[in-house]
Image (spheres, helix red, strand yellow):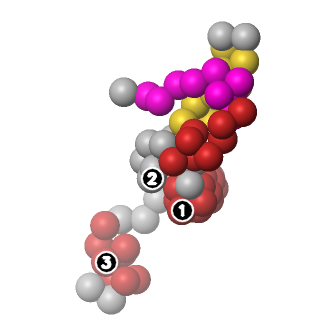
Amino acid sequence: MPNIKPVSDLRNYTEVLKEVTEDSPVYLTRNGRGEYSIIKFKELDKLKVIVRLLAKMEEEEKSAREKGWISADDAESALGL
């Protein structure tokens, strides 16, 4: 279950930070609406890697659509399998 707190709880930020764990961010609301999230650096790094990977996959898929796909045999051959 998500850990959701009003931003005013940051008055006691050390207690809020204790609740932040990997794969379990704390979400902060302002005026009853989601506004911020607090995550660990390790989690942020993973998210950045995922974004770069997805961008690269999109770029390569676009290239494959424009230039054509290769066969599974050609892929295995290129990988030395």
Gap between marks 3 and 2 measured at Cα: 37 Å
- In this rendering, which labeled residue sits more in front, label 3 or label 2? 2
Pointers 3 and 1 in contact (CB under 8 A)? no
Q: Quadrant of the N terminus?
A: top left
Classify 10 Å Cα crowding around label 1: few (below 14), some (14-19), many (20 and above).
Answer: few
Q: Which residue is mark 2?
A: 22
Q: Residue at x 65, y 28 (%)?
A: 9
Q: The residue tagged with tag 2: helix, strand or loop?
A: loop
> At 56% across and 55% down in the image, what residue appears?
40
Nearer to us in this view, 39 or 63: 39
Specify which label sits upstream in the sequence, 3 or 2: 2
Query: Residue pushed farthest front?
Result: 12
User: Could you tell whether 2 is left or right of 51 in the image?
Assistant: left
Amino acid at dot 1: Lys
Q: Is residue 38 above or below residue 11?
A: below
Q: Is residue 1 above or below residue 81?
A: above
Residue 69 left/right relative to 1: right
| Residue 63 position by quadrant | bottom right
Which residue lies under the disc numbered 3? 76
Q: Earlier in the sequence, mark 3 or mark 1?
A: 1
Front in this rendered view, residue 57 or 50: 50
Q: Please give the count of numbered marks on the rendered protein.
A: 3
Q: Quadrant of residue 44?
A: bottom right
In the rendered image, which quarter contains the C terminus?
bottom left
Residue located 31% across and 77% down the image: 76
Displayed quadrant of residue 42: bottom right
Task: Give the magenta part as a residue range.
Answer: 2-10
Residues at marks 1 and 2 touching, judged by CB atoms closer than 8 Å: yes
Q: Earlier in the sequence, mark 1 or mark 2?
A: 2
Residue occupied by mark 1:
42
